[in-house]
Image (cartoon, helix red, strand yellow):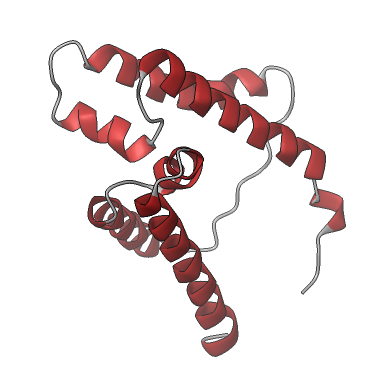
Amino acid sequence: MNIDWIHFTPWSSLAGGLLIGAAAAAFILFNGRIAGISGILGGLLRPSGGDVGWRIAFLLGLVGAPLAYALFAALPTATVAAGELTLIVAGLLVGVGTRYGAGCTSGHGVCGLSRQSPRSLAATAAFMLAGFATVFVVRHLLG
């Protein structure tokens, strides 16, 4: 295993993690809602009265934050080493997984673990183990 020391950013990563944690804590404290993206987006697909505005504002913030950042610094270049069909299939699998898992990695991993939810602990462990297994298979067995 090699570490890309040029792009190793522990302080930026720590700051980002602290900001995500603080935002999730503030969201549940002030709104009584979990900051799980699949639940927020899913609520727009089956809206209930008075529930749409904050969901749209949250999602606009997710899109707007990198755009605001780009005003002050260059955004990192993103490269995806997969074809369009692979990305479509992967996106659909993630969507199905969030339905079966009753939430996404952000909801379970950030918000659920901080609330000491046993279901979130099991879900996060399953996400991580599946990720480890996928990387192992792709890198070492399919090579």
Residue depicted at x 86% and y 52%: 6
Q: Residue at x 51, y 82 (%)?
A: 137
Above or below, 38 relative to 119: above
Residue pictured at 73% horizontal, 38% vertical: 14
Number of numbered tags placed on the structure image: 0
Q: Position of residue 143 (x, y in %)?
A: 58, 85
Q: Is residue 79 left or right of residue 35?
A: right
Q: Residue furthest right?
A: 5
* Residue 114 falls left or right of residue 91: right
Quarter of the N terminus within the rendering: bottom right
In front of the other: 82 or 63: 63
Left or right: 119 with respect to 6? left
The x, y position of residue 63, in whole percent, is 47, 26
Horizontal and vertical percent for residue 70?
A: 66, 23
- Horizontal side of 86 relative to 16 (left or right) equals left
Image coords of residue 5 (percent x, y): 86, 56
- Residue pushed farthest bottom? 141
> Foreground: 101 or 6?
101
8 over 49 or under it: above or below: below
Vertical position of residue 39 compared to residue 67: above or below: below
The residue lying at 60 percent from left, 53 percent from top is: 79
